[in-house]
Image (spheres, grey):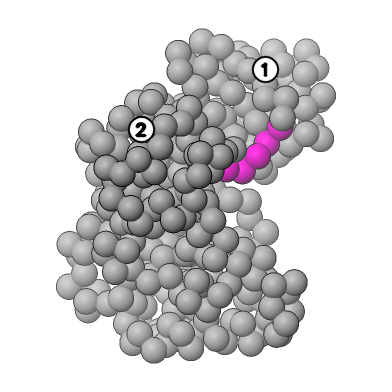
Amino acid sequence: MTAEHNEPIAQLANRLVECIRSMQSVVVAYSGGVDSAVVAKAAFLALKDHAVAVTAVSPSLAPAELEEARVQVQEIGIRHVELNTVEFNKAEYRRNQADRCYFCKDTLYSTIEQHRSKFGNAVVLNGTNVDDLGDYRPGLQAAAEYHVRSPLVDVGLRKVDVRAVADYWNLRTADKPAAPCLSSRIAYGVEVTETRVARIAEAEAFLKQHLNCRELRVREEANDLARIELPLSILTTVAQAEYRTAITSKLRSLGYRAITLDLEGFRSGSMNEVLVSLGTPASAMTKPLGSPAAAAPSLRNGDSDDQH
C-alpha cells in the first residue's frame, strides 16, 4: 500500500495492466524515466506483441539517458523503436518561450502519427501521472490534440504510487530521480541550440562523476552563465578550493563565461516556480497558445520527468 491508496501495490499494478489491456494495441511514448517505464511494463504485460515503446531521439536527450533507456527496455521485454525528432528545426521551439514544451510534444506525437501505420494504428500512451496535472506543462495540450491517453491518470496514480509499482516490478528506475530534457535547463528567452544542450549534458555528466552525485542541474542563464544546483548536503564541499578549481576549469572549457552556485540548492522544477506563482498550473495548458496564461512570461524554464 501507499499513503495515497489503501490497496495493495499488486492490486494497483493489476488495475493499470487491465486499463491498458482494454486498448488492444498501444504505442508508449517512452523516455526511460520511471513514469514511462511503468507504462511500458504494464503495456507489455497486458498486450505483449501488441505493445511497442517509442523513444524520441534528439539533441535534448542526454546520451547517458538514452543508453539507460535502452538497457531498461530490454529488461522490460517490450519492442523498442527509436525515432529521430526535429523539434530543433522549429523556430517556436528554439525561441524558448513558456510554451516551448508544447512544440516538443507536438513534434513527438506528430512523428509517432507519421509512423502509426507501422504500429497497427495503436492507441498512443504517455507517462503523465496525477501529480503532473498541478504543474505548468504545456505539453499536455499537445497530448490532448493528438488524443494521447494517460493510463497513470486514468487509474489515479500519483508519483509515489508509480514508484511503488516500479519497485514491485523490479524496474531499475524505481528510485531514479526525475530526468527532464536538457532544453529545460535553459532560461526562458535564451535560444535553445544544439551547442547549448550538448554542453549542459557534458557539464552535468562531469559533475555527477566528480561529485558522486545522482541529482543535480546545470541551469544555463543568459550571457553564458552556468547556475549549478546541488543537494544542500554537498554545497560546502563544492566550495572547497579543490572542487571549485576543477569545476570552474571544466565549465569554462565548455564555453561558460561565469559559473555560479545556487545557495538554495537543488530543486526539481525550480524553473517552473515563477510560472506557478503567476497562476499557470494545469488549467492553463488546455487554453490556446495565444491566451495570456499559456504565454505567461517567465525568467526561467522548468523540470519535468519523462519529457520525451
Q: Nearer the viewer, residue 303 or 237?
A: 303
Residue that appears at 46% across and 55% down: 282
Q: Is residue 268 magenta?
A: yes
Q: Residues within 10 Å of mark 2 (few under 14, many from 20)?
A: many
Circle 1 residue: 246
Q: Nearer the viewer, residue 165 or 49?
A: 165
Asked whether, in this view, residue 128 is left or right of residue 117, the answer is right
Residue that appears at 44% across and 78% down: 43
Query: Between marks 1 and 2, how big is the CA–CA gap?
Result: 31 Å
Toward which corner of the image does residue 222 lie, by quadrant?
top left
* Residue range highlighted in magenta: 265-269
- Where residue 250 appears, x then y in whole percent? 58, 18
Toward which corner of the image does residue 81 lie, by quadrant?
bottom left
- Where residue 94 appears, x then y in whole percent? 30, 32
* Quadrant of the rendering where the N terminus is positioned: bottom right
Q: Is residue 271 magenta?
A: no
Q: Amino acid at mark 2?
A: Asn
What kind of element bears circle 1? helix
Circle 2 residue: 96
How many marks can you see? Answer: 2
Residue that appears at 74% across and 36% down: 231
